[in-house]
Image (tube, helix red, strand yellow):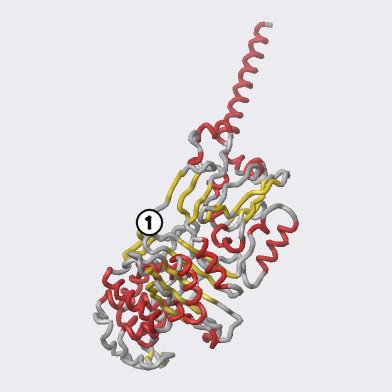
Amino acid sequence: MTKYIRRAAVLCAVLLVALLVNATRVQVLQASSYDDNPANRRQTIARWGQPRGDIVVDGRSVTGSRDTGEQLRYERTYRNGPLYAPVTGFASQVYGTAFLESAEDSVLSGTDPMLSPLPLWNDVTRAQNAGGKVVTTINEAAQQAAYGGLGDRRGAVAAIEPSTGRILALVSAPSYDPGELSGTGEEVTRAWRRLNGDESRPMLNRAIRQTYPPGSTFKVVTAAAALESGVVTDVDAPTKSPNPYTLPGTTTSLTNEVDGCEDASLRYAFEWSCNTVFAKLGVDVGLRDMTGTAADFGFNNRGLRIPFPVAPSNFDTRLDKAQLALSSIGQFDTRATPLQMAMLSAAVAGGGSVKSPYLVERRTSAGGGTVSTAGPRTLHQAMNPATALRLREMMTDVVSEGTGTNAAIPGATVGGKTGTAQHGIGNAGTPYAWFISWAQADDALQPAVAVAVVVEDADADRGDISGGGDAAPIAKAVMQAVLGL
């Protein structure tokens, strides 16, 4: 009898050990797989079981949380949702997150270890910190000026502080209210379908996710390449450029919209946007130096994040001479985001240094304690300071007496470059109106803002589209807002 009791005891011990081993396997080794299983709603319930941290602009929260009393308890709310949608994105209980709501989700949801003084204790207790705050670099006045300036027209605006890379405005139009995607009701599904089915694509962030042919605004890059390579040594000397200019290896002639471009100096050609001069300069500089200069300004960079990813701007690295000529005036396959063009203008204003643009100033706990901060970081030195100074002078000439006079601001020095970019089959599409610029108050030591504006304006007549007429006044309003003039 004792033998059978002993065997039973051993069997019970083996079973107990097996249970403990299995419990350890499930709760420790396989915990993450169970946590990430789509069928496990505990994380979703916990995620929305407390208020989400706020996104802050100029000291005020532009997001909030509403207690619904339902299982997914707190819904996201937005102040001036359409104004800040390109910055905040959305946080939907059904469709996930986008832009800052996505890139900063761990801070906003309270799961980031930085928010806890004892992160290992939270892992043991399964406790969750209150959502932290994300303080942005956005200037509210500049954001409103950009949004109001675009109005009902399709387009985008990006503004940067040249000395640091801080993003001061990021606007895309048309926009949408991300609050429509909060909640779990049928109205959320209808809103999602409507927004995604809208041909104007209001959920597309045109400032960082849409690339456009930059047109004549790209001539800043070509001018920089010509000066850096030594092809041009005197901005006031004739460039020996014919008018019209026959694209190399073709019978196609390139013409200009203005007079006086034949053998024009670089200064005159820049001020009045002579296509023939810059197309020939691009060929004279050569493919290697043109692609190198474009890359130094930020083109072809597939890793740029602000902190969410930015679509890469393109300057082809394999071109024949005719294609290079067109690419050098911002046509052919050359494409850029408005943010990239703001970076280009900021590099001119900042002495040739391309700063990494960033949207988040700092992250804080719910109580306001700072857990991380951002700061200036140089991506490239696109050109030497002497070249940047020459370009600043030429951009100033564009505003003082050239095609960009609509951007002039009393009490400030303003530099700019207009652009009208052709697109579509046979260039049949309505041209895009571009304007890039920077501004420095008369009593300031350095430029305070660089701006890029693109206006699609698909309903306008071709003759009504121009960078100086359509885009420059918007850039002026943004610069005035930053300068306080």
Q: Is residue 364 left or right of residue 347?
A: right
Q: Picture coordinates of residue 372 (x, y %)? A: 44, 46
Q: Which kind of residue does numbered mark 1 sit on?
A: Pro
Q: Is residue 396 left or right of residue 12?
A: left
Of 360 and 314, which appears nearest the observer?
Answer: 360
The quadrant of the image that shows the N terminus is: top right
Of 451 and 322, which appears nearest the observer?
Answer: 451
Q: Is disc 1 surrounded by few (<14), some (14 to 19) or many (20+) residues within 10 Å? A: some
Q: Is residue 198 left or right of residue 423?
A: right
Report the residue at 36% width, 64% height from top.
Answer: 354
- Secondary structure category for the residue under label 1: loop
Report the residue at 56% width, 43% height from top.
Answer: 110
Q: Which quadrant of the view contains residue 87?
A: bottom right
Q: Is 81 drawn above or below residue 43 in the view shown?
A: below
Q: Picture coordinates of residue 245 (x, y %)? A: 37, 91
Q: Is residue 291 left or right of residue 66?
A: left
Looking at the image, how many numbered discs can be counted on the residues? Answer: 1
Q: Picture coordinates of residue 319 (x, y %)? A: 39, 78
Report the residue at 35% width, 67% height from top.
Answer: 443
Is residue 59 visible in the rendered image? The answer is yes
Q: Picture coordinates of residue 279 (x, y %)? A: 37, 84
Q: Is 292 drawn above or below residue 59 in the view shown?
A: below
Q: Which residue is mark 1?
A: 376
Report the residue at 49% width, 55% height from top.
Answer: 136
Which residue, as the protein is rendered here, is positioned at the far right?
A: 186
Which residue, as the protein is rendered here, is positioned at the far top?
A: 2
Is residue 332 visible in the rendered image? The answer is no
Of 102 and 416, which appears nearest the observer?
Answer: 416
Q: Which quadrant of the view contains residue 193?
A: bottom right
The quadrant of the image that shows the C terminus is: bottom left
